[in-house]
């Protein structure tokens, strides 16, 4: 059974940092682009960051571009999202997704595997 399991969420004060992890099991995703999305209460799910199969290309939403770093370790089948200078508006459930594309895709319809999410709450 293929699974993506996110971890690392929690409660953090504004200005703080978090490192989210997404561990894949059941198959390797070393040839797939991977991405992070988030969904805030009452809002639609939105793209956060993506990384190509070998880590050579990354893609970020404007809202997090200067504060976040996506990375991957294919040997561990794991993707990470480091988020710094967190703001209350970053509060959301963060989802990891695997793309059908090897590139740093940002479109939800190209994702064929999803995790269940990890909650990030940023207090002011």
Image (cartoon, grey):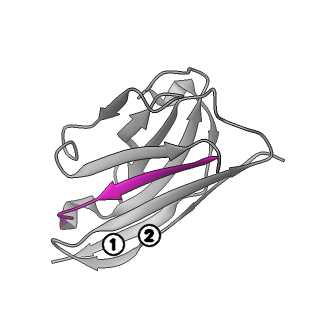
- Labels 1 & 2 near each other (Cβ < 8 A): yes
Residue 3 placed where, x, y %?
A: 72, 50
Residue 100 drawn at (x, y percent): 61, 23
User: Residues in magenta?
Assistant: 77-87
State which tag comes first along the sequence, 1 or 2. Answer: 2
Image quadrant where one finds the C terminus? bottom left
| Left-right relation of 38 to 103 | left
Q: Which residue is mark 1?
A: 121
Q: Residue at x 36, y 61 (%)?
A: 92
Number of residues whose C-alpha sits closer than 10 Å to that of mark 1, classed few (under 14), some (14–19) or many (20 or more): many
Secondary structure of the residue carrying tag 1 is: strand
Counting from the top left corner in percent of width and height, residue 94 is at: 44, 56
Q: Which mark is residue 9?
A: 2
* C-alpha separation, residue under disc 1 versus residue under disc 2: 8 Å
Task: Report crowding for label 2: few under 14, some 14 to 19, many 20 or more residues within 10 A (C-alpha).
Answer: some
Specify whether residue 109 is in view. Answer: yes
Q: Residue at x 47, y 39 (%)?
A: 35
Q: Residue at x 55, y 41 (%)?
A: 97
* Residue 92 painted magenta: no
**Total numbered badges shown on the rendered structure:** 2
The reply, left or right, for residue 82 in relation to residue 108 is: left
Which is nearer the eye, 64 or 90? 64
């Amino acid at each position: 059974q293929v699974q993506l399991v996110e971890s690392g969420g929690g409660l953090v004060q504004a200005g703080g940092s978090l490192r989210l992890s997404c561990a894949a099991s059941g198959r390797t995703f070393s040839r797939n682009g991977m991405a992070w999305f988030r969904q805030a209460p009452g809002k639609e799910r939105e793209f956060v960051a993506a990384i190509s199969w070998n880590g050579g290309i990354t893609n970020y939403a404007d809202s997090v571009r200067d504060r976040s770093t996506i990375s991957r370790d294919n040997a561990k089948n794991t993707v990470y999202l480091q988020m710094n200078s967190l703001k209350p508006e970053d509060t959301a459930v963060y989802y990891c997704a695997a793309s059908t594309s090897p590139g740093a895709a940002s479109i939800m319809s190209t994702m064929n595997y999803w995790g269940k999410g990890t909650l990030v709450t940023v207090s002011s």
